[in-house]
Image (cartoon, grey):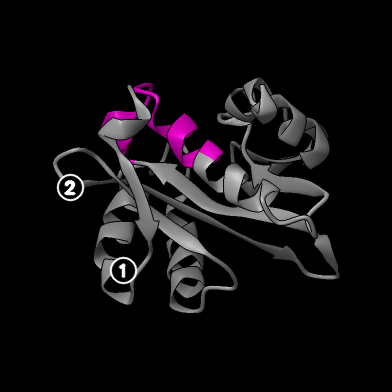
């Protein structure tokens, strides 16, 4: 997949239904059904930038954003990133992640990025330089561990200069 085959655009309030469809396409493998209300509350009161990933045909194939951590504005927390369930393993997650990380890295106020994910996505983030800092068994739901990971943004910035 090439970056020019997709585009990242800002989230709009009218994107709520497509965001819900993206979320639902990832239940139960990556999200627990009971998290749906949390996702909708999040998109209804965005704490930071949120984006939609569209394919070359203009179809929404992902969404995700970030916000400054509560209590530490030097940490950018990745929020509710997801790719449509039938489009996994096509490079879209990497495009969405690097699109967000590039925006975060462009802001010198941020020193690190953090994410709370599950054991099912931990490997994806590790391949992009995130390091696990904590794991809570069943932290999201039964069978869905909460995995906290961080990324040193200076290391990321240096890797993108090459």
Q: Nearer the viewer, residue 27 or 106?
A: 106
* Vertical arrangement, residue 79 with respect to residue 130, above or below: below
Q: Residue at x 73, y 47 (%)?
A: 114
* Vertical arrangement, residue 109 with respect to residue 46, above or below: above
Q: Residues within 10 Å of mark 2 (few under 14, many from 20)?
A: few
Earlier-in-chain disc, 1 versus 2: 1
49 inside magenta stretch: no
**Left or right: where 26 falls relative to 58:** right
Q: Residue at x 27, y 54 (%)?
A: 21
Tell me the number on the disc at residue 58: 2
| Figure quadrant of the C terminus | top right
SS assignment for the magenta stretch, majority: helix
List x then y, in percent, for residue 91. 40, 25
Mark 1 to mark 2: distance in Å? 16 Å
**Left or right: where 156 falls relative to 61:** right
Outermost residue to the left = 57
Residue 135 shows in this picture: no
Quarter of the image for residue 43 reads bottom left
Residue placed under numbered mark 1 in the picture: 16
Magenta residue span = 84-98
Per the image, label 1 sits on a secondary structure element best described as helix
Q: Nearer the viewer, residue 86 or 48?
A: 48
Tell me the number on the disc at residue 82: none
Residue 11 shows in this picture: yes
List x then y, in percent, for residue 37. 45, 68
Q: Residue at x 48, y 62 (%)?
A: 50
Q: Residues within 10 Å of mark 1 (few under 14, many from 20)?
A: some
């Amino acid at each position: 997949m090439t970056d020019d085959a997709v585009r990242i655009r800002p989230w709009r309030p009218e994107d709520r239904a497509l965001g819900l469809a993206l979320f639902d396409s990832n239940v139960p493998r990556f999200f627990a059904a009971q998290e749906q209300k949390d996702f909708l509350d999040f998109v209804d009161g965005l704490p930071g930038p949120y984006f939609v990933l569209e394919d070359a045909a203009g179809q929404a194939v992902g969404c995700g954003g970030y916000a400054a951590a509560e209590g530490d504005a030097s940490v950018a927390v990745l929020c509710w990133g997801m790719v449509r369930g039938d489009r996994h393993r096509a490079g879209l997650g990497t495009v969405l992640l690097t699109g967000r990380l590039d925006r975060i890295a462009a802001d010198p106020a941020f020193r690190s990025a953090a994410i709370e994910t599950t054991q099912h996505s931990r490997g994806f983030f590790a391949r992009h330089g995130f390091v696990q800092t904590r794991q809570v068994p069943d932290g999201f739901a039964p069978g869905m561990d909460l995995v906290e990971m961080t990324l040193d943004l200076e290391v990321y910035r240096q890797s993108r200069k090459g």
